[in-house]
Image: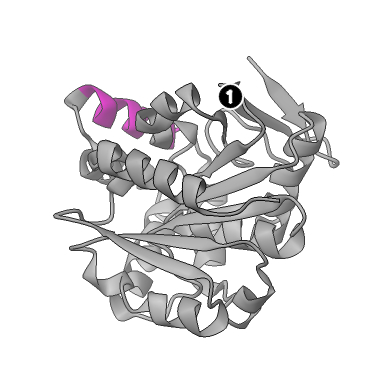
Amino acid sequence: MPYATTRDNVDIYYRLIGSGSLTLVFIHPPGMGHITFTQQLSLAKRYRLLLLDLRGNGKSGSNQKKIHFPLLAQDIYDVCQQLELNRLILIGYSNGASIAMEFAITYPSLAKGLILVGAFPKVNSSLLFGEFLLGILAAKLHAVPLLAKVIGNAHAYTKEFGMELETYINKTDANILSQMYQEGMRYDCTTRIADIKAPILLVYGQRDYYVHHYQNEFKSFHPETQVIYIGKAKHQVPTKFPDEFNAVVHSFIRKITIP
C-alpha cells in the first residue's frame, strides 16, 4: 500500500491515480477516509487525483500530537511535496473544506482553486453545533460504532457502500475522532478567507438549508467566490449526487484561469 511520511514520521495512506498537470486533492470529513470519494474516481479520466486518509483516520498512522487543522494541512503539504505535486485543486467536503481552506491560506502558491462542498468557515448555527457535539459525545462515550452506522447509512448510495463506509469509520481511534470534532467546532477562518488567493466554488445541496447562509461570509471576504446548488440534494453531495457533482468539478476547472 502507498504511504507518504510526514516531517514528524507519521505514515499517511494515499491513492494517486490518473494523469495531468493539475492534481485534484480530496479532503474528507472526520473518520470517513478517502473512500468518501469513491464516486469521484471517474474524474481520473481527465485529471490526476490524490485521495488520502488524514492523520489518525482510516489506514493512516498518528502520534501523540494533538489534532488541529494547521497540522492536517501540513500533512497534506508533506505528502504533496514527496509526490512532487505542485498545482493543486483542493476539494474539501464538509469539515474537510475547513482543512482545504487552511491549506490554501498557508500554502497559497500550491492552491490553484478550491471546490468546497457544504462548507462553513466557522460553526455558528445551533444545528451544526449540535452535530459536532453529538460526534464528540459519541467518541467519548465509546459509541463510535453507532456513529459509524448513522454516517454510513446517510451516505449510502448502495447498501454495500454504506457498510464499507461504516467499517472504515470504525478504523478511527475514538480519541482522534473526538479531537477532530472538537477542532472543527472551534475552528474559525472567517476573516482569513481574504488571504485565499485562488478562486473558490461553493457547492451546496439545495436542501442543506442550515449551511446556505455561510456563502455570505465567503462572498464578503473573497469576491472571487462562486456558488452552485445541487437540486434535491442535502449534505451528502459527493456520494449521493456524483454525476452532478463531477460535472460541476469539471466545469469549474475549465472556466478558471490557472497560472
Question: Is residue 229 visible to the viewer in this orientation of the structure?
Answer: yes
Give how far across and how far down residue 60 sits, in percent: 62, 32
Question: Is residue 148 visible to the viewer in this orientation of the structure?
Answer: no
Query: What residue is drawn where x is 41% and y is 62%?
Result: 202
Q: Answer with left or right where residue 179 lies relative to residue 70.
A: left
Q: Is residue 209 magenta?
A: no
Q: Answer with left or right where residue 162 lies relative to residue 93.
A: left
Would you place residue 107 above or below residue 25 in this image? below
Quarter assignment of residue 231:
bottom left
Q: Main secondary structure of the magenta part?
A: helix
Colour mode of the rendering: one colour
Residue type of the residue flagged with mark 1: Arg
Which residue is situated farthest in the right direction here?
A: 7
Give how far across and how far down residue 29 sits, in percent: 46, 49
Is 126 or 226 nearer to us in this picture? 226
Query: What residue is drawn where x is 56% and y is 76%?
Result: 222
Which residue is situated farthest in the left direction here?
A: 232
Is 7 or 207 nearer to us in this picture? 207
Query: How would you rate the neighbour count of disc 1 (Cα within 10 Å): few for under 14, some for 14-19, many for 20 or more?
Result: few
Q: Answer with left or right where residue 242 lies relative to residue 186.
A: left
- Count every numbered label the image shows and give the total: 1
Would you place residue 249 above or below residue 104 in this image? above
**Quadrant of the image for the N terminus?**
top right
Quarter assignment of residue 242:
top left
Quarter assignment of residue 75:
top right
Give the residues in magenta. Answer: 160-171
Is 193 or 69 nearer to us in this picture? 193
Give how far across and how far down residue 12 sits, in percent: 68, 32
Query: What residue is drawn where x is 60% and y is 54%?
Result: 257
Location of mark 1 (residue): 15
